[in-house]
């Protein structure tokens, strides 16, 4: 007898929990690394950088204020590049636009990993912020629900919302969605802890670990699709 065909997947692999976990770990590592090793800047959480920018302006620390504008601008540029690639590269291509973005991220992080601590922080932070914006704009849904892999405030809000729907409306699907958000938050925090540990022992080489994880994620997507 022929084996029964497996049921069709409800969501593409790039929306799966395993891809989300890989990307959330990378996001946590990058945030911890840039904060500890590259001048106290959050590469992913631009809200934090905007607050620090405002504080610097209030204290008339103009050079410091400009310093925080750099990762904010790089993040903005990354979103624009993502939208351009989305329009220029077909979904049916062997390397579609999401694959291309993962490849760009992995290569840039690999190169940045060779930069010593004496290398200007601003240049590395621009590259990392650019990378994070590519990722957050390319991977925006987890099994049909909006989420982020490089910051967790929105994920926390969504988790609380879904949990309330389960409590008040007895919606069991909402409980499943809430658990997915909590899993992403957990692994983002794990990534931050891993990033702190790796930064202490590998310094800039921490970025090579992120690069390797992104290459592995890319391989999973290409093999599946």
Image (cartoon, grey):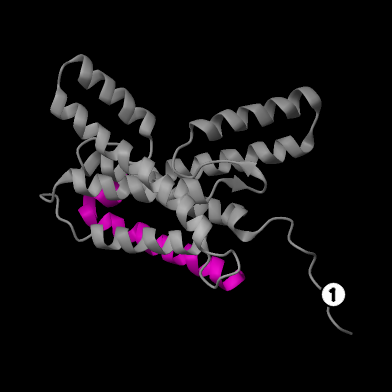
At horizontal 25% and vertical 49% (from top left) the residue drawn is 199
Residue 190 seen by the camera: yes
In the figure, residue 122 lies in which quadrant?
A: top left
Residue 200 inside the magenta-drawn segment: yes
Q: Is residue 173 left or right of residue 178?
A: right
Disc 1 on helix, strand or loop?
loop
Residue 180 or residue 215, whichever sits in front: 215
Residue 189 or residue 157, whichever sits in front: 157
**Residue bearing the label numbered 1:** 4
Q: Is residue 165 left or right of residue 121?
A: right
Q: Residue 129 in the image: x percent, y percent?
A: 33, 45
Q: Residue 140 in the image: x percent, y percent?
A: 55, 46
Q: Which residues are magenta?
A: 196-225
The answer to whether residue 193 is above or below residue 164 is: below
Q: Residue 90 in the image: x percent, y percent?
A: 56, 65
At horizontal 79% and vertical 69% (from top left) the residue drawn is 6
- Which residue is outermost to the left? 118
At horizontal 49% and vertical 55% (from top left) the residue drawn is 22
Q: Residue 191 in the image: x percent, y percent?
A: 41, 47
Where does the C terminus fall, quadrant-wise?
bottom right
* Dominant SS type (magenta): helix
The answer to whether residue 70 is above or below residue 201 is: above
Residue 202 or residue 102, whichever sits in front: 102
């Amino acid at each position: 007898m022929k084996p029964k065909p497996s049921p069709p997947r409800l969501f593409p692999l790039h929306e799966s929990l395993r891809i989300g976990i890989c990307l959330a770990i990378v996001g946590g590592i990058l945030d911890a690394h840039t904060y500890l090793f590259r001048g106290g800047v959050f590469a992913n959480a631009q809200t934090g950088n905007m607050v620090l920018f405002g504080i610097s302006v209030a204290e008339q620390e103009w050079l410091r204020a400009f310093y925080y504008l750099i990762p904010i601008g790089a993040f903005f540029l990354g979103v624009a590049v993502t939208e351009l690639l989305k329009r220029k590269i077909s979904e049916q291509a062997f390397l579609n636009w999401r694959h291309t973005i993962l490849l760009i991220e992995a290569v840039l992080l690999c190169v940045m990993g060779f930069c010593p601590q004496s290398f200007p922080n601003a240049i590395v932070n621009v590259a990392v912020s650019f990378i994070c914006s590519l990722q957050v704009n390319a991977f925006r849904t987890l099994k049909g629900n909006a989420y982020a892999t490089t910051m967790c405030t929105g994920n926390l809000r969504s988790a609380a919302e879904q949990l309330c729907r389960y409590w008040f409306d007895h919606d069991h699907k909402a409980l499943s969605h809430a658990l997915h958000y909590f899993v992403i938050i957990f692994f983002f925090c794990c990534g931050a802890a891993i990033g702190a540990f790796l930064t202490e022992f590998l310094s800039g080489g921490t970025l090579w670990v992120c690069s390797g994880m992104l290459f592995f994620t890319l391989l999973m997507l290409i093999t599946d699709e």
